[in-house]
Amino acid sequence: MPSPENPALHLLQTTFGHPAFRGRQEEIVSHVTGGGDALVLMPTGGGKSLCYQLPALLRDGTALVVSPLIALMQDQVAALTQLGVRAAFLNSSLDARAAFETERALCAGKLDLLYVAPERLVMPRMLDALAQSRIALFAIDEAHCVSQWGHDFRPEYLQLSLLHERFPSVPRIALTATADPQTREEIIHRLALDEAQVFISSFDRPNIRYRIVDKSDARTQLLRFIREEHPGESGIVYCLSRKKVDETAAWLATQGVRALPYHAGMDTASRSAHQGRFQSDEGIVVVATIAFGMGIDKPDVRFVAHLDLPKSIEGYYQETGRAGRDGLPADAWMAYGLGDVVQQRRMIDQSEGSEAYKRVSLTKLEALLGLCESAACRRVRLLEYFGEASAACGNCDTCLEPPETWDATEAARKALSCMYRTGQRFGAGHLIDVLRGRITDRMTQWDHDKLSVFGIGADLDDDAWRNVFRQLVALGFARPDHEAYGALRLTEQSRAVLKGEKPVEMRRTVTRARGSSRKRVQAALPAGADEALLGRLKAWRANEAREQSVPAYVIFHDSTLAAIAAEQPEDLTALATISGIGAKKLERYGPAVLCVIRG
């Protein structure tokens, strides 16, 4: 049988079931297959895995994939095994005998891909096994973990430069879904990828709608968002502390939401059980710290919510990117208030990092605050951070309901004067009481009712003043002092405002329209899709997944089932044309799928 004219495309179609490459995939696959090093920056859901999986099958030997999380390895290996690819993993979940058998398979050349944790890969025993094996390539996934400035820094990644030293002729491909220019340079330097070709895809995730709301009662706001826009759908809720994770998950459960907690303080068995339920069941909401999510391949996460401010735009982008990996509409929702800014500033100031680390962290926080306070398109501001120009998206809160802005110069001067007159020792709550002229015990204790600023802000209500103080901090005209229990202090920039030399414009709080995410998801299904058939296909898939003890999406993605429900193929030849159905899956599941179609 003659070899195909384009082996990579042939493999893509017959093994993975995709009709064509996306974006720069073909260019990357060709470069790495030819023996070149590469740094690939591609958004979550953009098809990064294929960029090393195809070269792994096209080159002689076994591809070593460095992955930081057990869950990611297990998901990837389960999915590849379904496709008939010889894949395995080595991590702490294996007993000694299973690990030995996997190492023996590697040395015998019986594996196409082997997923390995970074700390195991650099062990002398593992390096000896690699020296006795034929290695096709090294793929370093989640490469941003090498950055000491990043939100997911992993010290063991710093040792991976030895791969180039030990195996200089083996091509390497480093991949990440997020990296600002500084992080890109650090990846190249620390992994010795100076000769690597850099492939940067668009960071845009057009199916994700970004929404940031002013925090009032965040837990109630979250519940309303879930009930009105994502009832019965899978989602992730991020909180900063373990205690808040536990409390939020328990409260959501009492409100009828199938919520489970996840954080590093839980025992391993409970964490694994909760993660397993999230991956295999539909409609589970995981409330978690950022310990959860990296490498999770679940494609049908319909929303990611933040109850606390992330540390940086990179963290925000990485975490929100876990929504809508299937390309269907999804929401990135966040509740944000002054307390979040105070908390993040305190964490930076109290960290044990160097002064340089603190400066970088503050710069990253300020960039995130700029995104939160922006009156322009969120997506434009987000992509700008990664060096990508774009136009207003029409699918974020500021595009759908442009916020009003107002001349807040006078209000800002009153607020800053109040901070100065009270000695820069009080937080926003007391300052608002002074401005609004409230008599409280603290007011009379400190004689603040006798100050010239007492009562000068009665024209604005509490919410309006909270927004003024929050935006003063975000704009750099005030800063919280954690050593004084969150007291607000003046900055050098505030001098020009107090003197009347600098005008201040602020966003006015608006009530967001409540669109129906469920309707948007249904509208995104292929035209003519039979919903009853789609339901039967999902039921069949769920049963198949239970029998094999794998997540349902490993069998078929929702998008594949939706295409089947629309096309309703009558035979195996027609079924083979559906995206996501390769030769092995057609052979394994084709007859059963046709039976479901026929009812």
Image (cartoon, helix red, strand yellow):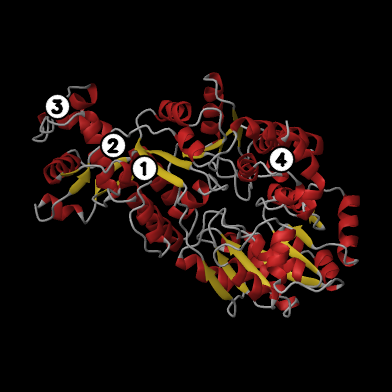
Residue 579 at least partly seen: yes
Q: What residue is shown with label 2?
A: 427
x, y percent for residue 37: 64, 75
Give the number of the disc on residue 342: 1
Cβ atoms at labels 1 and 2 below 8 Å apart? yes
Q: What residue is shown with label 4?
A: 551
Q: Amino acid at mark 1?
A: Val
Q: CA distance from mark 2 to mark 4?
A: 48 Å
Q: Residues within 10 Å of mark 3 (few under 14, many from 20)?
A: some
Which of marks 1 and 4 precedes in the sequence?
1
Disc 4 secondary structure class: loop
Q: Amino acid at mark 4?
A: Pro
Marks 4 and 1: which is nearer the front? 4
Residue 351 at least partly seen: no
Report the side of 86 relative to 66 (left or right).
Answer: right
Q: What residue is shown with label 3?
A: 437
Q: Residues within 10 Å of mark 1 (few under 14, many from 20)?
A: many
Q: Amino acid at mark 3?
A: Gly
Q: Residue at x 74, y 51 (%)?
A: 573
Disc 2 secondary structure class: loop
Q: CA distance from mark 1 to mark 2?
A: 10 Å
